[in-house]
Image: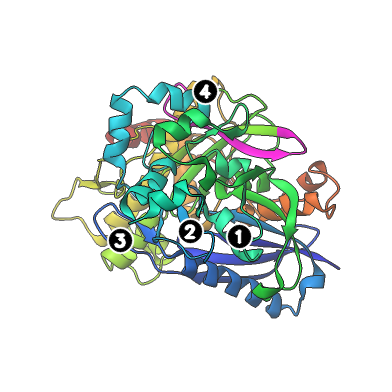
Amino acid sequence: MRYVLALDQGTTSSRAIVFDAAGGVVAMAQKEFTQHFPAPGWVEHDAEEIWASQIGVAVEALNRVGLTASDIAAIGITNQRETTVVWDRATGMPIHRALVWQDRRTAEACERLKADGAGPLVQARTGLLIDAYFSATKIRWLLDHVPGARDKAAAGQLAFGTIDTWLVWKLTGGRLHVTDASNASRTMLFDIHTCQWDDELLRLFDIPAGLLPDVRASSEHYGETAASVGLGPIPLAGMAGDQQAALFGQMCLSPGMSKNTYGTGCFLLQQIGDRPTPSRHQLVTTVAWQIGGRTAYALEGSVFIGGAVVQWLRDGLGLIRHAADVEALALSVPDNGGVYLVPAFAGLGAPHWDPFARGTLVGISRGTTAAHLARAALESIALQVAELLDAMRADCGVGVTELRVDGGASANDTLMQMQADLLGVPVVRPSVTETTALGAACLAGLAVGYWPSADALTGQWRVDRRFEPRLPASAATAIRARW
């Protein structure tokens, strides 16, 4: 029997998961890596540490079940999106730590671009709103602030990539400098209508075209791993940003189907078919995936702080020892006691897009306890997602009949019930919640014929639990009104 290996490079950890032909998890390994916060609102990663952690867990996962390269049909890659790496083509070394998608250092530059009237052009071409979240202003910051970088970029000596591109470069020993259409669509430099880099946007952001990777399909045989990485030759055949991969892994293959991923942030995506319909309610239009010459699109709403709020309770406040402890603590009180938390630690994403907002905690009384804070923190995740679904309904004119969920925090039954209650629609958790990695595996497997078609994959999707709304609509409305 052969398998597919998914590399799931996330914001706080790198994971490797081996899947079998039924979509089941055979082996998994995971390693956290360092988060750097050099200034308020600044977030950085060491790209070399990311690479070391990712190749390390790949080897570990294979070793756990005694597999070698010959047992792996293909590798699929999924990644934290927008995070920006620029490296020297000759040495392969990054010129600076990676600027993470959460990083807000270019917020004022984005405000100037909006004031100059660039917003309509950027949204029309890219489907995105001008924001520090996306890669373009991060690239420009690196070129402007790293000594000698701009001259080297102009001379073609530097390469830019989001994390997928960086991993493929490392996996192939520097032979391939590529990305896929889903990741390219998150840069603010990619025309989602023509599916090509846009010269006018490159001029707007003052970025040389020679920095950019080639754009490939999301499911395609790109090349093979180099002998130097220690895996043996394995086809690299699938690539998608983490949220698009999760949409595919949730088998949202028809327009109107929606999923939400609860990771460091929260990301609600609805598949909208083969036309990149613009949003009128502060969502973004993005490439979902590109397979066999066909491009599928999605509407997306992004919450910057989702599961990270639980990490804050653990690491920042010391209220819990382990992230999983938040559920029992929140359930020890019947309600939030009037306490509301808006976790705008890195600004507010959709539908507000306020880069200067910061966290707010209101309603504290003498009777407020750690349990009330824990409950308010969980509710803050569900309330932010509810706002996204409202905007999506307004854009599409149709209500979502169910929300498919995945990501680490989807294992929290209390949060999932809160979500169903506040949305007023069922929340459906699949039996395999590793849907981000599964989506990458499926894209890779399709490219090499491991699975014959996307339709053959849909029967593998199974329900673990369905959360029906239980809270009276009036109570849900009251909570949302206070929020």
Q: Which residue is mark 4?
A: 278
Element type where label 4 sits in the image = loop
Question: Which one is in front in this view, the residue at disc 4 or the one at disc 1?
Answer: 1
Q: Measuring 41% from the left and 54% from the top, which residue is drawn there?
A: 100
Check the picture and name the quadrant holding the N terminus. bottom right
* Residue 286 falls within the magenta-colored stretch: yes
Element type where label 3 sits in the image = loop
Q: Which residue is mark 3?
A: 37
Q: Measuring 44% from the left and 32% from the top, which residue is drawn there?
A: 203
Say whether residue 270 is left or right of residue 144. Answer: right
Q: Nearer the viewer, residue 248 or 81?
A: 81
Residue type indicated by callout 3? Phe
Q: Which residue is mark 2?
A: 87
Label 4 or label 2, whichever comes before in sequence order: 2
Q: Are marks 1 and 2 in contact (CB under 8 Å)?
A: yes
Question: Which one is in front in this view, the residue at disc 3 or the one at disc 2?
Answer: 2
Residue type indicated by callout 1? Trp
Disc 3 from disc 2: Cα separation? 21 Å
* Residue 355 falls within the magenta-colored stretch: no
Q: Measuring 79% from the left and 58% from the top, which residue is drawn there?
A: 22
Q: Residues within 10 Å of mark 4 (few under 14, many from 20)?
A: some
Q: Nearer the viewer, residue 356 or 117?
A: 117
**Coordinates of residue 209 in the picture (x, y in percent):** 52, 40
Residue 350 shows in this picture: no
Element type where label 2 sits in the image = strand
Label 3 or label 1, whichever comes before in sequence order: 3
Residue type indicated by callout 4? Pro
As drawn, the label of residue 169 is: 1
Over which residues does the magenta segment extend? Answer: 279-294
Q: Are marks 3 and 4 in contact (CB under 8 Å)?
A: no
